Amino acid sequence: MLTALIIVFVLVYAAIALEHPIKINKSASALMGAGWLWTIYAMASGDAHAVSEQLGESLMSTAQIVFFLMGAMTIVEVVDAHNGFEVITLRISTKKLSTLMWMVGFVTFFLSSILDNLTTTIVMISLMKKLLGQRDDRLFFAGIIVIAANAGGAWTPIGDVTTTMLWIGGQVTALNIMKGLFIPSMINLLVPLAVTSYILGPRPVVGVESADAGKQTQTTKFEQNLMFVLGLGILVGVPLFKTVTNLPPFMGILFGLGVLWMIGDLIHRHKDDDERASLTLVHALTKIDMSSIVFFIGILLAVATLEHTHILSGLAQSLDQYVGRIDVIVMLIGLVSAVVDNVPLVAASMGMYDLAKYPADSFLWEFIAYCAGTGGSILIIGSASGVAAMGMEKIDFFWYTKRISLLALIGYLGGAFFYIVEHHIFG
């Protein structure tokens, strides 16, 4: 049975990694993998009741992550529908390309920590299309945006789905992950920015004059500001809600979603149906990326079978035996996340190591959050933000590898070494 489970999981993993060449959506591969793995486990175990109980436990933990993501993605869509992100993006203005890159890098970094790396990448690349007239400049900026978005998402519990998984699973807590990973994540961004700034030199921005040309909006300034502040306030307030109530994060995000829904209906209640249709939360629900949600369901349930059959714990023991050093193991996980999706990698890591041996906020979990979150920047296919940038700007895989990968790698190693040294000195 164990051999069959491993073979099926490896094939599923390969299908996910090769999503674009084989033209099969990774969500389909993940769902089929979950179905096959649980079927093999149920048929071979002979204890239907025990398998059903384990499936119920896995479904409960998976549902918490899925409900949280659905709520967060819907809130972001509502803010975007009201042009709320223009509160930030329209304030970005400079005539020097290197200065603009620093501004874009920092805005992306902090915006990603509040929203998520995928949404932030989409927002910032959309802005670059309005600010930059030369395609070569836009491609370079897109690469930096991917690095900044992944770095910014790694140090908060709501900035990256993998960190969210660790937070909801109890491996990290909100305040400690922010304190522990802020500087390493910032180094991950600063190193590529410094190198890129030196390369760009004094080059001027081309095309910035027409950034606001022909801009139209369906919402008033009051509605933009209100939904922006309210949406970000709800997202930032979820960790506080969890701390005060001890309820799981998905409950806080759903509560906030209800508040946002009610206020949205109130401020648009006097508008015509056609005018308010695109501004409602109902419309936002139709725009969230359900394919990604389904992928998370499939891959988390698939990994759960490896956890219940003790394959992951056996893998952890093998790594400890042959590699030995936990920091090297985690750095390797981060490098692998540049090739394959970091969601199943982190899900597997959560099953490989026991909370009894590695308690919440220990070196292992925080370092996994950093490495898995930022390692995906090394290749453009290694993260959701990279894939989004690839699609929006039609970035070639080899162009990114030649121009951006080395920048992402030195940033990744810089932040990782800082975290290791800091941990050994201060504990």
Image (tube, rainbow, N blue to C red):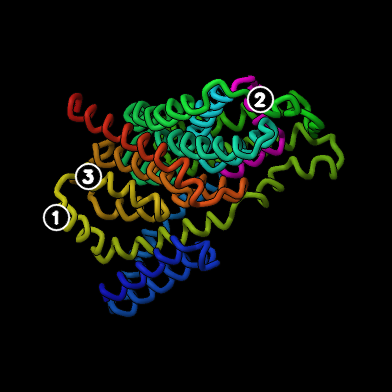
Point out residue 157 in the picture as x, y percentages from the top left corner.
42, 37
Q: Secondary structure at mark 1?
A: helix
Magenta highlight on residue 158: no
Q: Is residue 225 visible?
A: yes
Magenta highlight on residue 86: yes
Amino acid type, callout 1: Tyr
Q: Residue at x 28, y 29 (%)?
A: 418
Residue where numbered disc 1 is placed? 322
| Quadrant holding the N terminus | bottom left
- Which stretch appears magenta? 73-96
- Which badge, 1 or 3, comes first in the chain's sequence? 1
Residue 108 position (above or below residue 118): above
Q: CA distance from mark 3 to mark 2?
A: 42 Å
Please tell me whether mark 1 or mark 2 is closer to you in this view: 1
Residue where numbered disc 2 is placed? 87
Q: Residue at x 73, y 42 (%)?
A: 280
Residue 215 position (above or below residue 312): above
Q: CA distance from mark 1 to mark 2?
A: 52 Å
Mark 2, other Cα within 10 Å: few <14 / some 14–19 / many ≥20: some
- Which badge, 3 or 2, comes first in the chain's sequence? 2
Q: CA distance from mark 1 to mark 3?
A: 11 Å
Taking the image as shown, residue 105 lies to the left or right of residue 195, namely right
Q: Secondary structure at mark 2?
A: helix
- Which badge, 1 or 2, comes first in the chain's sequence? 2
| Quadrant holding the C terminus | top left
Point out residue 270 in the picture as x, y percentages from the top left corner.
84, 34
Q: Nearer the viewer, residue 380 or 74?
A: 380
Q: Quadrant of residue 301?
A: bottom left
Q: Is residue 168 visible?
A: no
